[in-house]
Amino acid sequence: MLNTDRHHVVIVGSGFGGLFAAKEFAGRDDVLVTLVAKTGHHLFQPLLYQVATGILSEGEVAPATREILRRQRNTRVVLGLVEQIDLQARTVTSRVHEHVTVTGYDSLILAAGSGQSYFGNDHFATFAPGMKSIDDALELRARIFGAFEFAETIEDPHERRRLLTFVVVGAGPTGVEMAGQLHELSAMTLTHEFRRIDPSEARIILVDGAPQMLPAFGDELGGRAHKALEKLGVDVRLGAMVTDVDENGIVLTYQDKRTERIECGTKIWAAGVQANELGAHIAQQAGAQVDRSGRVHVEEDLTLPGHPEVFVIGDMMAVDGVPGLAQGAIQSGQYAAGTIIARLAGEQERAGEPFSYRDKGSMAIISKYRAVASIGGMRLSGFPAWALWLLVHLVFLVGFKSRVLTLVNWAITFVSNTRGERVATNQQLVGRLALRQLGPHTSGPLVRGETVDQRPGDRSD
């Protein structure tokens, strides 16, 4: 595949930014694209909470990257966790288990995205999974449905109440959508299925340190969403910081310094993001600055200072006015690819145009037939916003098959209140924490039949 006659573009990451950048090079004989990603799928992250709550399967929101790009003959997909980027040598080093690959590049598009931020309290992750990956969603599905199953076996009313208390941390779009779905699940889907518990008695608590829900939507829409959730029975706690998390509950500290402990079985972390550590890795080499979320301060053309051949896009770039949403990643990915194409064509004027973000609005679904949407000067809520949310998310799903299956599952859920993706296994429940204990080379040694004890020095990725 490597041909020195063609300009070699390496893209790190298969999210919105990386995938849409790769698509821009379709049909170009003068460009060879290598897309390196730690997973073999493209994740439609805005619908991840629906995987966690049993509406959609993981395949519907995460089609295989190879399948998406199968007709793009100038593009190859490489599975690998990128561990090092050498800006001077222009190489990317990635690893699959213990197999290391070094890939050279002429242009580099860094689109490795972001992970969950616990604001310096990484130990919270043990008890409060985030919402950033398929593994997170499947673990949460096991925790959520498992809480109801376990509560059915418990005699102690206090323990039963704890198990049926769900706390969602973060009142942004993901947190609001998750809280709404937990309400629908307990109040509609699971009714009449249990004999010793009433699922509708589950407590859904939404917590955020900010004084307002959905701050990016403005006071009006944020207030509407707040009232809608409270009308459903969701307990909204704003101005409350999470200061401790353990197996049995969380501790909140309010702005007046008052503290409160909430006993709860399931904690879901939907607050804060941290850019992939590769951003800090290349920034250190280039002498660039990163913000407190690990995003790189880039030039106006999204390149790394002093390295015009390196583009940092999506959640990894720090650009004023560009939110960490799918549209920011898509537009920056298309821009980076377009700039490379313009350079190869000798169109210096076009190649020098600064990146300009076009805000296409924000949406958040609250529950069935309820949503809020801010698009340009329009402020929508209720059924019109809900219908628009469905349409937009269907359009942006990648692949005809994913769109059809998602539409069918939505129809079934909305009409019958049932959910077809409720399978949860113990492996999903404990897999993340078990892998962390086993270390980064787990798969490699186990394939060869070695024991984990032979590698006592291994640490987690």
Image (spheres, rainbow, N blue to C red):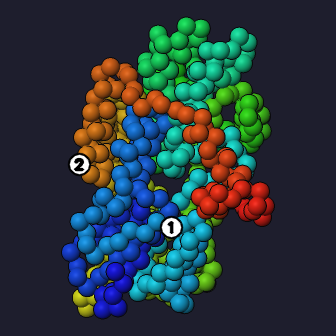
Q: Amino acid at mark 1?
A: Gly
Residue 332, horizontal then vertical, whole percent:
38, 68
Which image quadrant for residue 290? Answer: bottom right
Q: Nearer the viewer, residue 431 or 211?
A: 431
Which of discs 1 and 2 lies nearer the camera? The answer is 1
Residue 158, horizontal then vertical, whole percent:
73, 15
Is 226 situated above or below 9?
Answer: above
Residue 295, horizontal then vertical, whole percent:
55, 67
**Relative to residue 18, is residue 92 drawn left or right?**
right
Q: Is residue 335 visible?
A: no
- Residue pictured at 74% horizontal, 42% vertical: 243
**Quadrant of image for the C terminus:** bottom right
The label on residue 80 is 1
**Relative to residue 168, is residue 62 drawn left or right?**
left
Q: Residues within 10 Å of mark 1 (few under 14, many from 20)?
A: many
Secondary element under disc 1, as helix, strand or loop, is: loop
Is 196 situated above or below 161?
Answer: above
- Residue pictured at 58% horizontal, 21% vertical: 148
- Residue pictured at 48% horizontal, 13% vertical: 193
Q: Amino acid at mark 2?
A: Phe
- The residue labelled by disc 2 is 400
Is 341 situated above or below 21?
Answer: below
Which image quadrant for residue 381? Answer: top left
Q: Residues within 10 Å of mark 2 (few under 14, many from 20)?
A: few
Q: Earlier in the sequence, mark 1 or mark 2?
A: 1
- Residue pictured at 25% horizontal, 72% vertical: 73
